[in-house]
Image: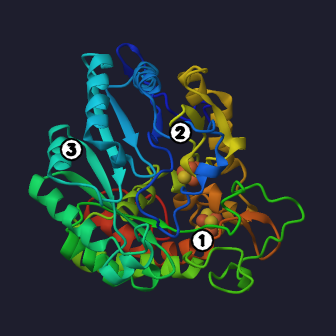
Amino acid sequence: MSNTLNFVNNEFNGKEIKRMHIMAKPIGAVCNIDCNYCYYLSKQGLLDYKKGCSPEINDETLEHYIKSYISSQNASQIIFSWQGGEPTLLGVSFFEKVVALQAKYRPSNVEILNDLQTNGTLIDEKWCQFLKANNFLVGLSIDGPQMLHDSYRTNKSGRGTFNRVMQTVDLFHQHQVQFTTLTCVNNLTSRNPLQVYRFLRDEVRSPIMQFIPIVEKKDFRECAPDSANSDSFIPKQGDKALIPGNSRSIVEPWCVSDIAWGNFLIAIFDEWYQKDIGRVHVQYFEAILQAWSGGQNPMCTLGPVCGKGMAMEPNGDIYTCDHYVYPEYKTGNILEDDLATLAFGSQQALFGLDKINQLPEKCQQCDYQFACFGECPKNRFIKTATGEAGLNYLCAGWHKFFSHADKDLSQILRTLKQPVANGKYIHA
Ligand code: SF4
Ligand code: SF4
């Protein structure tokens, strides 16, 4: 396997293509709302910001970032991703500065695209005009109907944000802003899969549905996912200590359980398969189909290697992944280090290759390894029934879903006249 994580393929401008991806956090972890399960709010105390220093990226760092992010890549398209905290707190004027700098440094034959993740509570007409005019793709966080959304997505005074977010949905449709929805699958939403799915389909009219399983160990504020010492208690698959809400649980009570995750995907998959294929887009299902047809799953969590998406804090510090913003995973700083070296160098490459190199035996023997690859390493904190560490917390749910959907996924590919290269139904 290449030591450059397969960033290199074919040619552009007569040289090998080089791509990287960074989630830039121009206002760090600062957010105007206070979602209970946010893994990122706690980072303000963890990161090494200078006392009294503004959490906003300054003009020098921003310009350096845009310039070096463009010059470190060789591709016909370069994608900037803006996340937080809540990046819209910086106002439209900040992003006007961003697009002006991108225009300044863009080579004439390169297209620059932007995506922006938002909680949707600050979006107004002016924002929509800007987003539409500059072709931004917006990821909107919305967890389902009001009762489910407002259970955790609350403002600083504890009030739900649902009504304000639905105003943003209307504005996006009116202004034809390109958007996707990002829905957190927690202990509550996971128990109501069809309510969530039908709401996103019929009321939000979500162009692309993204679901993210909420999995957080109780020590996630202080400890990187794999920093457990040898004395730490590591439960085996099926142990009560892995049930969210159990008094002995090692995960936060708002997490989705492994089986609830599988059941959530199954319920939505069945409805999608029976009624909505081709007209409703669910990121997971479309990505997983690629794995069944013999391609590589485009989602980092389900592919063989990861590490392609780094994270950048407002002071220019770079981390191996958005889920690994912990001091031990800082690889450098864009003002002090060469960005291409950080992105394509050995530390980042090894981080990515660990995903496949550290697969436990159970995953290596698994019928669905091709579709899962042990899922995200941040969730690999349990033991197999035989006592091997490094199994994914969600394993039982993933396996249940893959077994359930296997036949139908093969059937979809056959209907589309595409090859069925994986799964138990290769031969019809
Ligand atoms: S650690 Fe998880 S989220 Fe990060 S790149 Fe790897 S698979 Fe993706
Ligand atoms: S389903 Fe479970 S055993 Fe199979 S690859 Fe995924 S995590 Fe490993």
Mark 1 vs mark 3, CA separation in Å: 36 Å
- Viewer-proximal residue, 326 or 383? 326
Q: Where is residue 421 shown, x and y percent of the image?
A: 45, 57
Mark 1 Cβ inside 8 Å of ligand 2: yes
Q: Which residue is mark 2?
A: 313
Classify 327 as above or below 156.
above
Q: Where is residue 228 shown, x and y percent of the image?
A: 80, 59
Mark 2 vs mark 3, CA separation in Å: 23 Å
Ligand 2: give its quadrant: bottom right
Helix, strand or loop at mark 1: loop
Mark 2 crowdedness (10 Å alpha carbons): few <14, some 14-19, many ≥20: many
Residue type indicated by callout 1: Leu
What number is the disc on residue 131? 3
Mark 1 vs mark 2, CA separation in Å: 29 Å
Q: Which residue is mark 1?
A: 394
Helix, strand or loop at mark 2: loop
Task: Name the outermost residue toward the top.
Answer: 14
Dot 1 or dot 3: first in sequence order is: 3
Image quarter of the C terminus:
bottom left
* Side of 305 relative to 197 (left or right): right
Q: Where is residue 390 shown, x and y percent of the image?
A: 74, 61
Mark 3 Cβ inside 8 Å of ligand 1: no
